[in-house]
């Protein structure tokens, strides 16, 4: 018995030495993950020659010229417009998407209709289809509708791409709802629609925010589709637009890094505020399968 | 999708009429076009290494964090952060890391390891390695979160019991954690495989498929054929092949999750 406890203690990670060893490993990995981003931030406040000669050094003074947005606009990198476009596309898409998927998810979970199981299997199948396989026909459709280089040309497909995952997630959530609650309300003469807005939506705010957040991230960061549809500078989104910095400032690191910072800041603020929901939402949808 | 399939039998330049070619596009792809096989091979290499790398790193981090270590919430926050960044931003940042005068080479010279310095994107093997490294840097937090969520569902008492029986930490991980996380492993492997096959943005921005086509993957091939060279019909063949590959994995995925569901109910 004594031997056993001794042995288990020696192999346990609980000891002080082991504990600090783990901390060391984690700190090193955290630096690897975080340092490039931190470096990006402080280096963007240095003039290019300083960045290049003293790569790791902190800025000696606050150099703000890299952030002269008007100058970029004159050069054709209209970063303010890209930011606006990304915001409009993302917000409009997730609002419509969530609204549609709420109703569809509720219907699938709680209303009986023929072909329901088939629909669910179909939706699961849709998740697996890569955007690449659809991009050529979608490009063709959007060109035919005259929506190339418009924000709607992005919003519509983004809604379509988000539907399978969001509907499935919401319907698994609605399934846990007690049927008695719905039946009781129905007996009182409440319609499905009214019940939906007065009872179901208010108590599902957690699930709704998850859908909003997960779709926000994927749409805000979407690249390939945006690259194909919106070639016109006025309709570019941020992910495609900041590539302009890659084209024009290959060796001029200052503006390049400042452009990246402008692109990164919204994501980081969003993450800082919602990281709990993001972490929960990312795993919740898929773990249940 | 049906239209993609249809178009794969035609020649179309993005405007004008569709010219029927029968199976010509397919024949050309499989016999003449060496680029396609390079891209397919690269996609497979990328998928294998990215899946193994992301899962391995994610799993190790999750285990370390799950030891109820101090500051574990901060670590979780930091490790997951890259996942919310866009591929464009991540790639453009990494371009400055692997630049000949970039962070990596400068860091090596500080360590007096000048002989390890490279022009990282100049040869295709090295460039592919960099792309995989970027993908792991970007995605390991995603795996970690899944493992962590799975681990926190495991009953603490099982570990306590094993501890009393004298099982070492390593032993507890191998014979308790891993088997109980079987579902998480299978889900993650499939999700990562499917998303790796679709990789586009990091390859496109870091190497443009270069040097000399050495890092082309299916995604970049498709984009180049369709939207740069206006060969929509030909690109559709690649789209069809990518579709078949992902459908294959989706079917496996549905089978596996259905199986898990059955086990859970039993």
Image: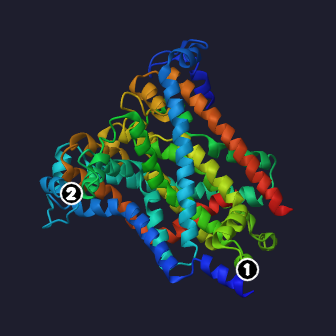
Chain bearing tag 1 is B
Report which quarter residue A230 is drawn in. top left
Name the residue carrying label 1.
B157
Q: Position of residue A12 (x, y in %)?
A: 61, 78
Q: CA distance from mark 1 to mark 2?
A: 51 Å
| Above-or-below relation of B75 to A143 | below
Can residue A211 be seen?
no
What is the quadrant of the C terminus of chain B in the image?
A: bottom right
Residue ID at (15%, 54%): A53
Label 1 residue SS: helix
Q: Is residue A20 above or below residue A79?
A: below
Determine whether A63 is above or below A147 in the image: below
Q: Classify residue A108 as left or right of residue B263.
A: left
How many numbered callouts? 2
Quick one: label 2, few (<14), some, or many (20+) residues within 10 Å? some
Residue at (19%, 44%) from the top-left corner?
A251
Residue A69 x %, y %: 20, 54
Where is mark 2, residue-wise?
A55
> Which residue is drawn at the image coordinates 57% and 40% (left, top)?
A130
* Residue A137 placement, left or right of A124: left
The label number, if any, that marks residue B231 in the structure image? none
Q: Which residue is outermost to the right? A: B266
Find the residue positioned furthest to the bottom: A2
Residue A112 point in image, percent of width and height? 81, 55
Residue B124: x percent and y percent? 40, 34
What element does badge 2 sit on?
loop
Q: Is residue B79 visible?
A: yes
Work out whether residue B115 or residue A101 is closer to the camera in this orientation and state it.
Answer: B115
> The numbered mark 2 sits on a residue in which chain?
A
Q: Is residue A100 left or right of residue A36?
A: right
Q: Quadrant of the N terminus of chain B?
A: top right
């Amino acid at each position: 018995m004594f031997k056993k406890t001794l042995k288990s203690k020696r192999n346990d990670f609980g000891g002080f030495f082991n504990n600090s060893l783990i901390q060391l490993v984690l700190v090193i990995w955290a630096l690897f993950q975080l340092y490039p981003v931190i470096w990006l931030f402080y280096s963007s406040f240095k003039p290019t020659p300083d960045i290049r000669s003293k790569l790791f050094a902190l800025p000696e003074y606050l150099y703000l010229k890299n952030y002269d947005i008007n100058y970029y606009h004159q050069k054709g990198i209209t970063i303010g417009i890209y930011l606006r476009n990304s915001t409009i596309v993302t917000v409009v898409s997730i609002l419509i998407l969530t609204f549609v998927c709420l109703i569809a998810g509720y219907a699938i979970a709680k209303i009986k209709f023929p072909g329901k199981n088939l629909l669910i299997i179909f939706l699961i199948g849709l998740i697996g289809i890569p955007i690449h396989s659809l991009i050529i026909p979608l490009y063709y459709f959007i060109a035919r509708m005259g929506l190339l280089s418009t924000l709607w040309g992005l919003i519509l497909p983004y809604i379509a791409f988000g539907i399978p995952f969001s509907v499935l997630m919401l319907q698994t959530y609605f399934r846990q709802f007690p049927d008695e609650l719905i039946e009781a309300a129905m007996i009182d003469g409440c319609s499905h629609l009214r019940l939906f807005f007065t009872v179901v939506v208010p108590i599902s705010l957690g699930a709704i925010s998850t859908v909003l957040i997960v779709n926000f991230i994927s749409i805000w960061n979407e690249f390939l589709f945006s690259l194909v549809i919106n070639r016109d500078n006025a309709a570019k989104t941020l992910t495609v637009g900041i590539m302009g910095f890659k084209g024009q400032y290959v060796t001029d690191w200052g503006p390049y890094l400042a452009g990246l910072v402008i692109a990164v800041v919204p994501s980081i603020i969003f993450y800082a505020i919602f990281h709990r929901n993001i972490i929960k939402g990312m795993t919740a949808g898929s773990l249940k399968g | 999708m049906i239209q993609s399939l249809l178009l794969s039998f035609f020649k179309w330049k993005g405007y004008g009429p569709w010219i029927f070619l029968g199976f010509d596009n397919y024949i050309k792809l499989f016999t003449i076009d060496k680029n396609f096989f390079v891209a397919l091979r690269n996609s497979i290499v990328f998928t294998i290494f990215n899946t193994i790398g992301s899962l391995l790193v994610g799993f190790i981090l999750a285990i370390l964090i799950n030891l109820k270590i101090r500051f574990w919430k901060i670590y979780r926050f930091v490790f997951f952060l890259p996942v919310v960044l866009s591929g464009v931003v991540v790639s453009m940042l990494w371009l400055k890391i692997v630049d000949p005068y970039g962070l990596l080479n400068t860091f090596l010279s500080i360590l007096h390891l000048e002989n390890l310095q490279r022009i990282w994107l100049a040869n295709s093997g090295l460039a592919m390695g960099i792309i995989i490294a970027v993908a792991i840097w970007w995605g390991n937090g995603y795996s970690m979160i899944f493992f962590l969520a799975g681990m926190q569902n495991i009953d603490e008492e099982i570990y306590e019991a094993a501890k009393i029986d004298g099982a070492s930490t390593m032993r507890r991980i191998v014979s308790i954690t891993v088997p109980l996380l079987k579902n998480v492993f299978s889900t993650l492997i499939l999700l990562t495989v499917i998303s790796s096959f679709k990789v586009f943005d990091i390859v496109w921005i870091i190497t443009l498929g270069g040097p000399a086509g050495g890092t082309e993957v299916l995604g970049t091939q498709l984009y180049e054929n369709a939207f740069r060279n206006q060969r929509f019909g030909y690109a559709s063949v690649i789209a069809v092949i990518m579709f078949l590959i992902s459908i294959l994995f989706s079917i496996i995925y549905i089978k596996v999750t259905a199986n898990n569901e059955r086990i859970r109910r039993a």
